[in-house]
Amino acid sequence: MYFLIIIKTIILYILVIIIYRLNGKKEINQLNVIDLIIFFLIIQLITISIWTNQSIFISFISIIILIMFQLLFEYITYKNNKIKQFIDGKPIIIIKDGQLNFKEMVKSNYHLEDIIKELNEQGIKRIEDIKLATIDKGKLLIQEMNNEYPMPIILNGYIDYFSLKKIKKDINWINNILDENNLRLDEIFYAFYTKQKTFIIKKD
């Protein structure tokens, strides 16, 4: 019995590693809500398979079905930015032009000590030196006053209205760029704005 448990454990462990490597997920902070649900369901299936007489083949098929569902859902969110924002959530602004947004800090359960620690790790001494700080997928992203980072404005044919608002532009500005380049929105894979210039990468 114990020998069978060991064999099942090794086989299922190798299987899960292979599946997640093929899936491209390398770090826990890259996982969204759906990924975590699938992850815990797989753990449950593995546990049942190891400690019961259930065939390892049944567990294998069940895990494959879950992974296929996950890949399908990722494809849907890749194609639909609204669904992606619903699953991943919108970035939360907690610092703007050197001013803390305490309301958003409370809503996101992010404490001042966390911000100060993150600033120290990035070598930033004062909150007043921050132009913009957002929380995206649990990570604090910081833009300093004197640094300008590329802002994504179009992702796979969908407008990033969050970034558009940041750079103080609107849909008419996007339409003008499309007209100037003789492009449709669905022909653009990635477009970003930096240093008063717009850069476009077209789909193949």
Image (cartoon, rainbow, N blue to C red):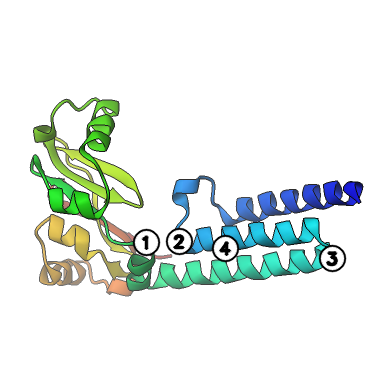
Q: Which residue is mark 4?
A: 38
Q: Which residue is mark 2?
A: 33
Numbered label attached to residue 88: 1
The residue sitting at 85% across, 49% down in the picture is 7
Q: Position of residue 6 (x, y in %)?
A: 84, 46
Q: Secondary structure at mark 2?
A: helix
**Whether residue 193 is visible:** no
Sequence-first tag of 3 and 1: 3
Amino acid bearing label 4: Ile
Q: Residues within 10 Å of mark 3 (few under 14, many from 20)?
A: few
How far apart marks 3 and 1 lie (CA) works out to: 36 Å
Q: Residues within 10 Å of mark 1 (few under 14, many from 20)?
A: some
How far apart marks 2 and 3 lie (CA) works out to: 29 Å
Q: Secondary structure at mark 1?
A: helix
Looking at the image, is 109 positioned above or below residue 83?
A: above
Sequence-first tag of 4 and 2: 2
Sequence-first tag of 4 and 1: 4
In this image, 47 relative to 163: left or right? right
Amino acid bearing label 1: Asp
Q: Position of residue 38 (x, y in %)?
A: 57, 63
In this image, 138 relative to 98: left or right? right
Contact between labelled residues 2 and 1, with CB atoms less than 8 Å apart: yes
Pick whichever, 107 or 192, lies toward us. Answer: 107
How far apart marks 1 and 2 lie (CA) works out to: 7 Å
Question: Which part of the image, by quadrant, shows the C terminus?
Answer: bottom left
How far apart marks 4 and 1 lie (CA) works out to: 15 Å
Sequence-first tag of 4 and 3: 4
